[in-house]
Structure formats: structure tokens, C-alpha cells
Amino acid sequence: MVELQGLLAVIKKRCLLDETISIDKLQLPDNGRPDLALIASGLVEESDMLEVLAEYLDLPLANTEQFPDTPLKAGGANVSFLRQKRMLPILEDDTSITFALSDPLDKTSLQSIKLLVNKGINIQLAKSADLDRAFDRLYEQEKALKSPALKNQVKDHVSIEEGSPAVKLFNQLVSTAIANEASDLHIESSSSGLRLRYRVDGKLLELGNLPPAYLKEMLISRIKILANLNIAEKRLPQDGRITVDVLGRSIDVRVSTIPTINGESVVLRFLDTEKGPNDLVALGLSDHTLSTLRRLLKAPHGMILTTGPTGSGKTTTLYAALQELNLIERKIITLEDPIEYRLENINQIQINPKVGLNFATLLRSVLRQDPDIIMVGEIRDEETARLATQSALTGHLVLSSLHTNNAFGAINRLLDMGLEPFLISAAVRAIISQRLIRRLCPKCKKRGSVTAREHKQFGLKIGTIINRPNGCMSCYQTGYKGRLVLTELLELNDNIRDYMNNPKKIGSVDCSLLPEQTLAHSARSYIESGETSIEEFVTIMGSLD
């Protein structure tokens, strides 16, 4: 029996009950638990009662953001029992295990746990809903893999029936990826069997709760079957595509396989076809960049380039520009490899080098289709670059991308490809360079101040208050959640054209040729506003200079 008066004293101290309410009239359960009666009656919220119990029993409240990312074994304790009793193991060392639980007065369950784990027991308090969510997150995959038929089906991994462990695992992996907004899933063969990693916000996160190693071949075969790939071919790379329905959405999955020394490695890239591309406003461009770009897009001809490394959002920006330009009086044709989103009222063409359809070949044919606007997914060689610039000079607005580190570097890249300076200066109107940088997690970011070293390195004023990463359950202990776009827009002017046409100046770039707002300026504004950190920018760019 619970000491009634002791609990009531804490409840009254915290003013949780109206003075007119008589505790004596509450219908107590058989165990005489006033805490359960008060919660069931709606007189006291569970969170308030946990604080009462914490004070009454001198127990700490659990920080749910610091729950583990991978499930703890907790000795010999059965997961079903732990889940039923809402006793989540959150920390373990050589001598003790810490459990987060919602009912610290359940003495029977606590005694059972002590016998099972054969270690010291520490207790922290947490809400039932928080514990249920944690169990779902940590143990759902493990539950999906518990099948009595698992080992019997390993040999027959070519013909995989619906409902098999491989099917369940694939569905679980894809659902988890989409729910956590992962862009890619890496399924890698290792010497120990299988390695699973999600790419979230541009960074790879390892899945701690791995499926059995003997399930690897079944999983890869399942993916190949869905992607119409040759399941018997393990010596050569293969590419395919799958369309799946997840969480009520149609997801396009690009599949790539490649042989490694330990077996095949598979990468799945997820594209939400129903979500579609963002518009220019949703990209998060600065006001200056947005207004300048919109003005440039109104031009009847010329070329606009986006630059940056792989995964910097170049194609996303091009799609947003096409959304802005997509009017009934314009014919728009795109050449893409691959087509990431399907756009209404736009003629999209898939590059297929296997049958001779490359960017250069298709671009020649496209010009005979009377287009107003052409989007070339990527300029990879001199032939494509030359055709694209010539198209821009013959009355077409051309949008394309190029792999360079910054906006000005695109000019040197085109010169290196063999294009004449006069051709570039006449065709190219503007170059946008961009990066994606992670946003600090709003739930756990911590405040700090600029150090003397950071002042010396980055020019930020000493003592300036900035935010730094910390890490919590919401952001998988990374300290970051979501991404921001860094941009610099270089509009070609007379100084830049003079640079291109003067061989003596090539290679020596002075500040007057650079954009007014560089990537470093964009990063600095995000750092000073507390949306990202110095540490994150350094990982992307190296410095703020």
C-alpha cells in the first residue's frame, strides 16, 4: 500500500488539486494507489504526477532527448516484458543498469528486473507516451525480423515470397528512411556481414540495430527483383528504379549496385514524387539573390548556370527556376540524367548513353523542337558546353549546372573546356554557386560565445553570442536537424568580360571580380543569427574567408 498522506502532502504543496476536491471520495484501485486514481480521473496530469513521485521518492526525471540511439540488451530481460511494464533501459555499465519507467511504485516488476539483470538498478521517471515512442523506435525492426521461418528461407533467396523476412526488412528500412527524411540508404557488405547507413541532412548515420548477417543475400535479391535487375549478376554494377507506396506517398527509389571485395553494395536514393520540387521562395534564398535571379529569369535568352559539388542542391534550384518559368506561352524542354521529378507541361527527356542519347546528341535534336527554354542537367564536356552556349546566343534561355567550387570558378572551367572567351562572355548572364549546410537542432542547440581563436580565424567579434551543436534524441545526437542553402550569385559585368578576354589576367582574380555576397557572407549571417555553427561551416568550406 502506498503511504497516502505522504503523496497527498506533496500534491497539496504543489497546488495540483482544488481545495474543494476531497481525496477520500476517490475510487482507489485494489492496490490503494492514489496516484493512479488521480490520473485516471483526470484531476492530475501524468507529467505533474511524475514530478510528485520524483519529489516523494527522491528520484530524477529522465531526459527523453538523451534516450539511447540503439537498444540496450539489459541482461536477460525480455523485450516484451520490458515494453509491457514500460521499463526502458537507457544506460548500462559494468555494475548497474539505469531504467526509465513511468511507474516507480510497481515493486513486483522492479524485483523481477533485479533478478533478471543481476546488476544494480537505477531508476529515472518518464511519461508513458515517451516510453512507448522510444520502444517503437528502438525495437520495431527487431520485432519485424523475429520470424521462425527466417533461417529456413535463406537458401531460397531468389524466389522471395511476400511476407518473408526479406520483404519485411525491406519495407521496414524504406519506411524508416522516409519517416526520418533520409535521402539515401546504404546497404553495404562487410567482413562481418551487413552494414546499414542512412544519409540524413547530408551525413551518414549508422543503423545500430542490424539484422542477422545471413539475411544479406535475401535482402539484396529482394531489391534486385523489385528494380528489374539481374539477380544472378554480381560481378558488374547495375542501375534500376523502384516505385513504392510509403506512409500514403508514392516514392521513387533509384537503385545502384556495385561489387566489392566483401560482396555487393547497394545504394537506394529516395525521391518523393508527390511532394514535387520547391519553388524559388521555398529554397530559402536571400532577398538579394531571389530578386536578382527573378530578374535574370525574365530575359528572353542567355545562360544561367548553377555550380557546386555533388549533393549541393544544384538540380533543386534548376527545378525551382523551371517552376517560375512554366507558363502556357512557353515551350520548355529538359535533358536530365536522371529525371528526379516529373513536371507538368514540361517536356522532360532522359539521357540514355547505352543507345547513344547523350547531352550533346539530344541538344542538337531539341533545337529543332522550337523550344523557348532549355534545361541541360549538367555540362560535362566541351561539345555540350559549346552547344549550350550557342543555343543561348540563338534566342533560347538555357539553364544548366557545372561542377565547380565557386561561382567564378565556372568561368575558368568553361575556358579550360576550350570555349572561346567571347563566346562565354556573350552567352552567360549569371552563375549561382551553392552549398547545403546543416541547421542547428532547435531542441538542443546551446549558446556560447566567440573565442579569441575563432576571432582570429574567422573575424567574428570576441564575445559575440552564437549557437553550437549539442545533440539529443530528436537529431540522433548530431546536434543538427534540417539544412540551409548558402548561395553566391555572380552576374557577369564588364570587369569580368575584360578578365576573360585578356590572357594576361587569366588565373589572377582580384576581389572586384567576386560576387558582392559570397558563400562566406551567407554562412556568416546564418552563424550570427544562430541557425548554424562555425563548426558546421568549417566542415563544408574550411574557413569563412
Image (cartoon, rainbow, N blue to C red):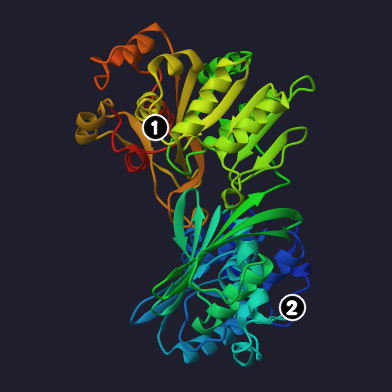
Q: Is residue 97 left or right of residue 460?
A: right
Q: Can residue 491 be seen?
A: no
Q: Is residue 414 left or right of residue 457?
A: right
Q: Is residue 279 left or right of residue 306?
A: right
Q: Can residue 107 be seen?
A: yes
* Element class at badge 1: helix
Q: Earlier in the sequence, mark 2 or mark 1?
A: 2
Instruction: Give whichever of 124, 158 is nearer the camera.
Output: 158
Query: In the figure, residue 255 lies in which quadrant?
Result: bottom right
Q: Residues within 10 Å of mark 2 (few under 14, many from 20)?
A: few
Relative image position of residue 70 (x, y in whole percent): 48, 70
Relative image position of residue 493 (x, y in whole percent): 42, 9
Three-letter amino acid code of the residue under disc 2: Glu
Which of the two discs, 2 and 1, sits closer to the camera? 2
What residue did someone put label 1 on? 527
Q: Residue at image x 34%, y 43%?
A: 539
Three-letter amino acid code of the residue under disc 1: Ile
Query: In the figure, residue 136 lies in which quadrant?
Result: bottom right
* Element class at badge 2: loop
What residue did someone put label 2 on? 162
Q: Residue at image x 45%, y 36%?
A: 381
Total labels drawn: 2
Q: Label 2, label 1: how many angstroms apart (C-alpha)?
A: 50 Å
